[in-house]
Amino acid sequence: MSGSTRVAPQTRKMWWMNIMLLSAALATMLSGAYFLFFPGGFRGGRNPWYGVELLFSRTTWDNIHTWGGILMIAIATLHLVVHWSWFVRMGKRIISELRGGCGCMNRYGRLNLALNLVLGLMFLLAAISGIVLLFLPHGREVTTTLLWTRKSWDVLHTWSGTLMIIAAILHIGIHWRWITKVTRNIVHTAWDKEPSCSRMQQGTFSA
């Protein structure tokens, strides 16, 4: 049993990195959904949701979104560095196909590559716009700052984040078999270790 469920150290590291990335993404997504459906702004008839709180205060949701986004950027950057050789290899295959050569990619490989490109682009736009919004002054100003107004940066951040979530769900979907297999093996490995540790402790106490 333990031989069939053994997980390579590199695979285990990748699994934990993906779990941390998913956790940060969920925190950022949920807090972003809060701001999308319960906007701030000013008290009055134009904003019936002013002052509405859901589980946490608006300040807490803001901190969750900010720090979750920063953590997601850090882990995603590490994810990119770890998989850099894969991106280089796929890039060479694309160039080979464009030049009339053999890229040797099947339909699944092309779909995976296209999805990763969309996911990476939307993540980059969401990250850049999020950083800009973090440092731009708040208020009702309409002056142009860093190419666009704050409203334009906000729209870019909202839609790039939404498309990133859709691409991420599809990305998880096509890798679902790997995720479930590795998760099952890690759980089985931890479950197999627990009885042995218990027996060792019992032997120690009985001695």
Image (cartoon, rainbow, N blue to C red):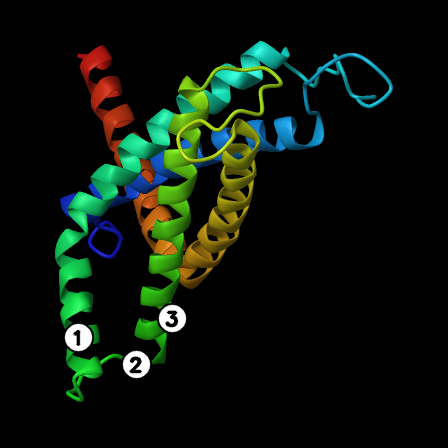
Q: Are marks 1 and 2 in contact (CB under 8 Å)?
A: no
On the image, which quarter does residue 126 sit in? top left
Q: Secondary structure at mark 2?
A: loop
Q: Nearer the viewer, residue 63 or 126?
A: 126
Q: Which mark is residue 105?
A: none
Q: Earlier in the sequence, mark 1 or mark 3?
A: 1
Judged left or right of residue 151, residue 64 is left
Residue that appears at 39% across and 57% down: 118
Q: Residues within 10 Å of mark 1 (few under 14, many from 20)?
A: few
Quick check: can you spot residue 103? no
Q: Residue at x 82, y 23 (%)?
A: 46
Q: Is residue 26 left or right of residue 195?
A: right
Label 3, on which residue? Answer: 111
Circle 2 residue: 106
Task: Tell me the quarter of the image containing the C terminus.
Answer: top left
Q: CA distance from mark 1 to mark 3?
A: 16 Å
Q: Tell me the number on the disc at residue 95.
A: 1
